[in-house]
Amino acid sequence: MKTRLLILLLILLPLSVPAQTPEERGLEIAREADRRDTGWGDMQATLEMILRNRRGDESRRQIRSRALEVEGDGDKTLIVFDSPADVKGTAFLSYTHATRPDDQWLYLPALRRVKRISSANKSGPFMGSEFAYEDISSQELEKYTYRYLREEVVDGRKTFVIERIPQYAHSGYTRQIVWIDQEMYQPLKVEFYDRKNSLLKTLTYHDYRQYLDRYWRPARMEMVNHQTGKSTTLLWKDYRFRTGLRPRDFDRNALKRAR
Amino acid sequence: MGMSRSTGRLAVLALLLALAPAVGAARSEWSGNISLEYRAFVQPPLDPRQHGDNLSGAFEPRWFYESDDGRDSLLFEGFVREDQGDAQRSHADLRELLWERVGEDWELRVGIGKIFWGVTESQHLVDIINQTDLVENFDREDKLGQPMVNLSLVRDWGTLDIFVLPGFRERTFPGVAGRFRGSLPVSTGEARYESADGDRHVDYALRWSRSIGDWDLGLSWFRGTGRDPDLLFAGDRFIPFYPQIEQLGVDAQATLDSWLWKLEVIHRRGQGAAYWAATGGFEYTLYDVGGTGLDVGMLAEYLYDERGRAAPTPFDDDVLAGVRLAFNDEQSSEILFGLIQDLNGDGQVINLEASRRLGERFRLEVEARWFRDTRAGSLVDSLRADDYMQATLGWYF
């Protein structure tokens, strides 16, 4: 009798376990995406940023970027501006952290001055573009809470649609909706909702290529601001991984040497 | 610096440039800017020999070479200005001619270079390595190149910079026809030194710096020829006198969310009685106000010099209040407005700076300064007839 009861319970047990909540599912997908994008070590790339106003007038920025994965913490990144000519040599260093404010420094070449700056500037435009500082900084898992919404097909590819809510202070967004490619576990599209919960911007990722047989990186990102009609294209060129960068290449002296 | 020394250095530069292709260069690049500056003065000058509205032009070329492995670099920065009204403001300088080698946990720089130390905005007390190119702008932001051998040791406990500074640069001053010189000109040709070695005296400096959490700290020490000359009264002119000094400096910044707290303190011996001076304050910024992208920064600093009224600086007991607007637009537009008030009634300096990019290669900078309510005999008072507005158009390449 007890044995049969036990067997009955064991059969019924899976049915009584509560189904995974949307929050758990969302976190699981985000965690898997993060896991698949870990281990690249260090990275360098050249970026071209094309700013477009409502009328379609364009202006361009050339930037070089390098990044270093840090175990147990967020990435270190160093960005140098190559153009416009009057800001050439200006450089920006960031030590990203998951749950505490990032450490950031700015280098002004004319004065040879390294300035520690506040990382509270999250929602402000980066170099006058439609990308905010929070959009371009390293995305750590703990910076958001997640909620699974549904599955959807985008441009012939199956995606998971996740809502994520920034947990850090000073964000310009109440929430974001992310379409994550089910094969690559990389975003194809992100919608940004402003402080009034209106749709502010849409970011789309294009021309993904795989590096080191594992890591997917887009060659092109398009950010459109629906409220102002302005847009920015980000072209990523010349991705190089594991070139031997070390923490030394991301210290304050390295900022001064970034030419 | 003598002409022969400059020529010698230029020869070295030419040789290096000739060698560069042979070395199989990884990267080398020319850059720089050419600018036109127009200054308009509100009042006539105190001395009829001083010029009125004035035009000048400057050329600032830069070149660098970086080796394949990034370990060796050669850096060059030159400067030349041609001034319409003040012959002494027409000047040239080798700002930088430096070889830099980067090691595993050390860096070595040899040649002529420019080093910046400090965190405050109103003035830079601890920044002692480079001499001020005062004739460029009396705000002391422009510096002359400094010969140096600099070893940086990069360790877990911080970075230690060791400087050997062979050779001294004298401060540039406006000439008889120049503005911002007070009632009497400074006779730079008659400069005197406490040390018998004059401008060939070898000076030394050390600095420890480290970033710990929200704090950026620096401790510095300097011994050698003081960069700030005493101005000795000689009837119809001042004669600069360079004493031997020893200076200790502390600089600290705490970056706490939207607040930056800054402090610089120095203690100097050898230039009159030993004295303290300090600058401290904060900068608080509201980012992306109303989602417009505009950043509004509020600054306040207190400036103190123990020597008080006897100090050769106007900033003995003063407060700076300022606002910085950064538009974060495509043209990188910025406005800085500041007011320095002397708490003992010596006067007020109002400062307005604005700049924006024009097109892809031009930058327009506008600057205006007013000296108000100055007390007769105070240092600010000597500038009371020099209220001005300035526009600089720069072409960058």
Image (cartoon, coloured by chain):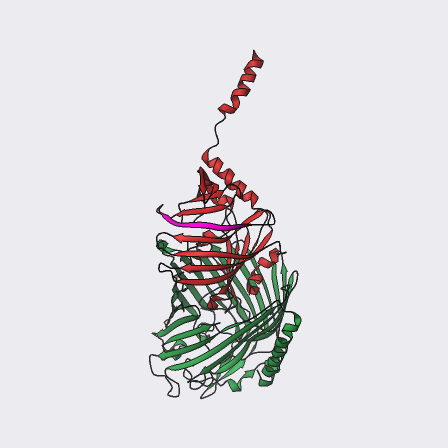
Chain colours: A red, B green
Instruction: Verify whether residue A200 appears in magenta.
Output: yes
Confirm whether residue B134 shows in the render.
Answer: no
What is the quadrant of the N terminus of chain B in the image? bottom right
Residue at horizontal 36%, vertical 74%? B370
For the residue pair B55 and B125, the one nearer the viewer reads as B55
**Can see residue B16?**
yes
Query: Which residue is depicted at the point 58% across and 78% down?
Result: B168
Image quadrant where residue B196 sits: bottom right
Examine the image and state in which quarter residue B69 appears: bottom right
Residue B138 placement (x, y as % from top left): 44, 76
The vertical placement of B381 against B236, above or below, is above
Look at the picture and state if B259 lies above or below B58: above
> On the rendered structure, is B275 left or right of B370?
right
Which residue ends up furthest to the front in the rendered image? A156
Name above or below for residue B291 compared with residue A156. Answer: below
- Specify whether residue A21 is painted magenta: no
Q: Residue furthest top?
A: A1
Helix, strand or loop for the magenta stretch, by majority: strand
Which residue is at a point 33% across and 79% down the rendered structure image? B42
Q: Position of residue A222 (x, y in %)?
A: 44, 53
Q: How many marks?
A: 0
**Relative side of A244 to B291, left or right:** right
* Residue stretch in magenta: A194-208
Asked whether B106 or B280 is in front, the reply is B106
**Residue B225, image x and y in percent?**
57, 76
Left or right of A214, for residue B373? left
- Taking depth in this image into account, of A86 and B100 the one nearest to the observer is A86
Q: Return the x and y of residue A71 as percentages of the image width and height.
A: 59, 48
